[in-house]
Amino acid sequence: MGKQRVRSEKARPANQRESLRLVAPVWNGGTSGIRGLSRAVDPEGSQRKGRALLQFLADRFYDVEAVRGYLLQKQVLKVLQKNRSFTYIKERYGPYVAGASFILKQGGAVKFQDKEWMRPNGRGLSGELWKLREVPVEAVDASGCAINYQGLDHLLALRELQSLSLRCCPHVDDWCLGRLHQLADSLRELSLAGCPRISERGLACLHHLQNLRRLDISDLPAVSNPGLTQILVEEMLPDCEVLGADWAQGLKLGPEEQPRDTASSPIPA
Amino acid sequence: MLRGALRFGLGPGLLGRGLGTHRGGSTLDWDGKVSEIKKKIQSILPGGAWSPLCDTSHLPPEHSDVVIVGGGVVGLSVAYWLKRLEKQQGAVRVLVVERDHTYSQASTVLSVGGIRQQFSLPENIQLSLFSVEFLRNINEYLAVVDDPPLDLQFNPSGYLFLASEEGATIMENNVKVQRQEGAKVCLMSPEQLRKKFPWINTEGVALASYGLENEGWFDPWCLLQGLRRKVQSMGVLFCHGEVTRFVSSSNHMETASGEKVTLKRIHEVHVKVDHSQEYQPVECAIVVNAAGAWSGRIAELAGIGKGPPGTLQGTKLPVEPRKRYVYLWHCPQGPGLEAPLVADPSGAYFRREGLGNNYLGGCSPSEEEEPDPGNLEVDHAFFQEKVWPRLARRVPAFEALKVRRAWAGYYDYNTFDQNGVVGPHPLVINMYFATGFSGHGLQQAPAVGRAVAEVMLEGRFQTINLSPFLFSRFYLGEKAQERCII
C-alpha cells in the first residue's frame, strides 16, 4: 500500500505536472486515503499538524470521530453526486448529448464527429450542444475529471468513441477498466497516464480492446513493475503502440546525473 | 495529587530507608520497586485494570446478545451486517468466538480467492452480484476514520468455463439464467476461443462461457482484515477461545394437528480459553453457526441430529470438512496477462498469479479419490497423476512446468447439495446457520452476512430470498443442487 516511488524527472508540460501533484498525495504516506485527495490542494506543512491533532482527538472522543466520519461521507457523496445518471437528458436528447453534457459538466472536453473540440466555457453548456442529437461523439478528453465506476455509464453509451483520455482521473480504478470491453469495436486510442488507482491487474482486462492502436500507460504509481507490465501488455495487444514506462524508470540515477532543479534542467524523455 | 505524594514520599525523603540502602552493598532494586508500586496504585485508582474480585480480562463477557461461532469471513460478515442494520446504535451486543486467531486452518485465507457469477441457481448469482458490488465499494462500506483504505488486489480477468458436448446444453441454460439475473457473461464457440486465447487446446470443447465483468480473483486476507478492523470499530467483541458446550432448555409442545414437537432454546455458550481448562459461560439470545468446516461438530454440540433417523430431530447438519489441494507452479511459456480463471470440464482449474508466469490451480477430486481431511498435508502425487495431465491437455504450454509451492485447505462441504445452509433451525430455534458453502463461501460472504442479519433482526429475508437454502430442505429432501461447482 502507498509505496513511495522515485519518479523519473521527465520534462512535462506545466499543466500536466500540476494535475499530477493533485493526485500524488493519495499515495504518498498512504495514511488517510480518501481524505488525502482533499488535502492535495493545500501545502503539506501546517495541515499535517492539524491532522495529527484531529487524529488525537478522534481517538479519544466519539463525537469527534463521528464528525470526521460524517465529513468523509460527505466527500464520498460529492463524488457520487457528480456521477449521477442524466436520465432526462438521455431520454430527450439521446446518449451522445447526455454523455457530452456529463463530460462537460465534469470539466472535460468532447469532440463530436466532424466538429471542433468543445470545452466547458464557465457559463454552462453551450446552446449548440442540444442540436447535436444524431451526431456521434468521436473523442473524449476526461483528464482530471472525477469520473467513477457509475459515471462510466455515460461514456460506455458512446458506441462510436474512438479516442478516450482518462489521464490523472483520481477515481478510475481496475474495476472501471473491466467495463471498457463494451467499447472494443470502436476504441482506437486510450490514455490512462497518471491515474493513481490503476494497477497491472486492471491493465490485464484491456485485452478485449483489439482495435486499440495507441495506449498510454505511463506514470501509473500503483503498478508494481512498470517495465515488465509494459512488455506483457505489448504481448497482449500486438497491434497496439504502448507508451509506457521509460526503460530507465526505477533505475537509480548516477551522481553526475542527479537533477538539481527539475524546473530548470528537464531531462528529455 | 496522589502522584505528587508518591514522588515526595518514596524519594530520598524517607530517611531511614535511604540510609539503609547507602549503607550496605544493597541488591534492593529500589527503582524497580518504586515503579511497581506506582503501577499497582495507578491500577487501583478508578479507570485502572484491577478488579478486587478476580481478573477476567482474558475471558469473554458474561452476557452477549449474539454469539457468532467462527471468526472467518462469513462470521465477520454476519457481525458487520448485524451492527450495520441494527435499529439503534449499540442495540445488539455481538461476540465473535474464534478458536485460532492466526487463521492457520481457516478456509478463508487458504482459498484461491475467486469470485464469479456463473452459477446455475438464481440465488447464487444474486448473492455473488451483491458481493461483487460490496467488494467494489469496499472502502465505502468498511471505512474506518484515519485508517488507510483497503486494496483488495482484485484482478477483473473473469472466469472461463469450458464444456464438452454433454455439458453444452446445461451451460447454455445456465448462461440464460445468469444473463437474466444481470451477470455479464458471453458464450464462445471453439473457433472464437482459439482466436481469443491461442494457448488453449480446444479439443473436446463444444462451448465456453466467459465472464466479461465483475468476475476474477482477489486477496481474501485483505477482506478478512478489513472486516475485522471495521467490525471492531463498530463495537463487536472478539474472543479467542473454543465453544465446548451449549446449555439449552427444551419445551415440549404440540402442533395444531396434534403432533408432539420438542423445541430447544440455547441459553448459554461455554467458551473454553486456549491452553487452559478455564471456560466462561456466555449467556446469549442467539447463536450463529459460522464455523465453516467444523460446523457439523458445533451443530452436534447443540443436539441437532440426535434423534431417530428420518425425523426432523434426527436430521443432522450435512456439512463436513473436505480437503482440497492448491498448487503454485512456474511455467515460462504459459498464458499471458489476459488469462482468466480457466475451468476444464474434467474438474481441473488454474489462474494466473502475479506477473512472473506463475499459476495457481488444482482439481476437484471425484468421490472415491477424496483425501482424508484429518490434516492439511499436501499430496504431491495428486498433482502428478490427476491435475497436471488434465491441465497439460488443455494448455499445451503447461507440459513444461515446475511446482513451486502447494497447500491444502478445507471446503465446508455440504454433502446434500453443495450449497450453503442459511437461516434458523426449525427445532433449535435460536441457532442460525451460515455455513456449508462448499468452496464458494468467500465470494458469497458479504451477501450471506446481510441475509442472515436480516433474518435475525427482521425475521425474514428482505433483499435476496434464500428460502431454498434453509435447513428444513434436508428433512424435506428438496435439493437446491448447484451444477457449476469447481
Image (cartoon, coloured by chain):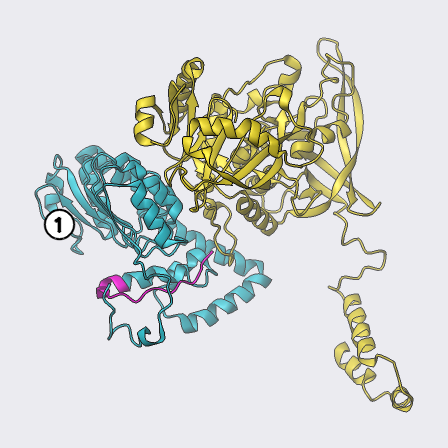
Q: Is residue A3 magenta?
A: yes
Residue B194 against residue A22 in the figure, above or below: above
The picture quadrant where one finds residue B406 is: top right
Please tell me whether mark 1 sits on a helix, a strand or a loop. Answer: strand
What color was chain A assigned in the picture?
cyan
Q: Residue at position x 43%, y 26% from top?
A: B161
Q: Position of residue A264 (x, y in %)?
A: 24, 75
On the question of residue B87 being in view, the answer is no
What color was chain B assigned in the picture?
yellow
Residue A100 against residue A246 in the figure, above or below: above
Q: Is residue A66 magenta?
A: no
Q: Which residue is mark 1?
A: A117
Residue A249 falls left or right of residue B485: left
Q: Nearer the viewer, residue B156 or B310?
A: B156
Residue B131 falls left or right of residue A241: right
Q: Considering the image in quadrants, where does the C terminus of chain A appear?
A: bottom left
Residue range corresponding to the magenta coloring: A1-17
Q: Amino acid at mark 1?
A: Trp
Q: Nearer the viewer, residue A70 or A252?
A: A252
Q: Position of residue B298 (x, y in %)?
A: 73, 31
